[in-house]
Amino acid sequence: MAGVTDDTPDPAGGMFVRDEQGRITGYAYDSAQQLVIPTSVDVGHHGPDIGYDLPLEELVDDIDRACKAYLKVGITSVVDPQVTTREMPGYMAARQQGKLTIKTTCMYLSNHQDAINELGITDHIGNDLLSIGPMKYYCDGALIGGTALFYADEPQTDHGCKCNKSAGRGYTYWPDIEAFKEALIDTHSRGMQFGVHTQGDMAMDIVLDAVEEAQRRFPRSNARHRIEHCHGPTREQVARIKRLGVIPVTQPGQVHETGDDLTSIYGERRAKRFCPLRDMLDDGVPAVISTDAFVQSYKPFDAISAAVNRLSLTGRDMGKVSASLCWKRSVPIPGMLLTRFITKPVKVRWKWANWRIWPSSMRRS
């Protein structure tokens, strides 16, 4: 398919699953998917290509349906964490046609970094309905795919990482880790905010090292760089996240929806620590809960329930004592994730809808 054969090498940031004879079995992980289903956007080693080439009118219809579904469950503001030149025309057309009805901040994928730099964009740009926000980077692979970058042992004590060589499991998208760090530092130096897909503890050190070096070279207050997912930090890394002022953007729904698979892949001890919201809140880290739709349920209460109850689909304990979010603890609203605050609410059915309040009786005991 698409010229992929058993002799096709694994690309940077991806791999083909092969049998004992080296034959491709049909599973393509992360960036390898682009070789099987090529599209008009060359993502390269900058992340998985999660989009498809569609007619403009179909993109607009998809945005229209999504907005209606989100509004139905009380969502009035979203961040699209991976936008390319393929998706942006759909957003522009949907806005022009009145079908973009929720506040949308687009994170351009880092394969567009040079173009963004050439345009001189150094901050959020747009209006209160549609804007370009942080730059999106990928550090390691997927948690559920088993390609997230973890140290071999836990707790990890050696911060001297030799990526893709001494890792216990997983890999980075970028084959040159120093180039990846310099890209983050460059984005920081221009005054921009970035968000980095980061799952494993080894990947966490790579990203935090880059943030620390960026602040050393180009000190900035309140940069609010984001770690997208942030599911595998150690206790020590949580403290480091606090010190550096990084914001974890978590999706506890993954613990519920894929908890059994995560336990099988990573073992019970490590899996129970995934998405350690209680550690974050106890340390004063402004952790934020999100849904990661379409990967997980887009409904806010599903994410809240997963954060509070810490149970897999089969009822497995996913760390209720050590990591669960106490119902009475507060979680910052997503608006603080962006260096430019959105000031105007969206009018929904003739009512201003930026907040939703629910009774304590909705808490599942």
Image: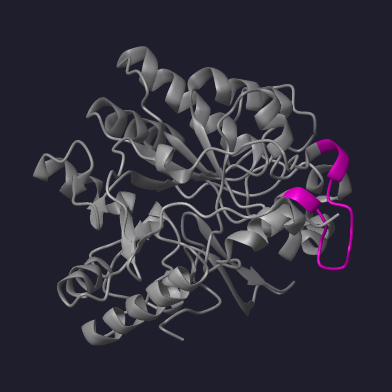
Q: Main secondary structure of the magenta part?
A: loop
Does residue 202 appear left or right of residue 264 in this picture?
left
Does residue 355 appear left or right of residue 112 in this picture?
right
Q: Position of residue 143 (x, y in %)?
A: 65, 55
Q: Is residue 175 visible?
A: no
Quadrant of the rendered image containing residue 255: bottom right
Does residue 345 appear left or right of residue 201 in this picture?
left
Q: Is residue 78 magenta?
A: no
Q: How has the structure been colored for display? A: one colour
Which residue lies at the image location 27% right of the left edge and 80% below the top edge? 60
Q: Is residue 279 above or below residue 290?
A: above
Does residue 91 appear left or right of residue 270 in this picture?
left
Q: Is residue 316 visible?
A: yes
Which residue lies at the image location 30% right of the left edge and 68% below the top edge? 101
Q: Position of residue 361 (x, y in %)?
A: 76, 56
Which residue lies at the image location 50% right of the left edge and 24% below the top edge? 209
Q: Is residue 166 above or below residue 282?
A: below
Q: Position of residue 192 (x, y in %)?
A: 27, 34
Q: Count up the numbered dots.
A: 0
Q: Which residues are magenta?
A: 308-322
* Closer to the camera in the image, 297 or 192: 297
* Closer to the camera in the image, 159 or 325: 325
Quadrant of the rendered image containing residue 264: bottom right
Which residue lies at the image location 72% right of the left edge and 57% below the top edge? 305
Quadrant of the rendered image containing residue 320: top right
Image quadrant in which the C terminus is located: bottom right
- In this view, which residue lies farthest toward the left? 119
Q: Position of residue 17 (x, y in %)?
A: 64, 70
Q: Is residue 315 magenta?
A: yes
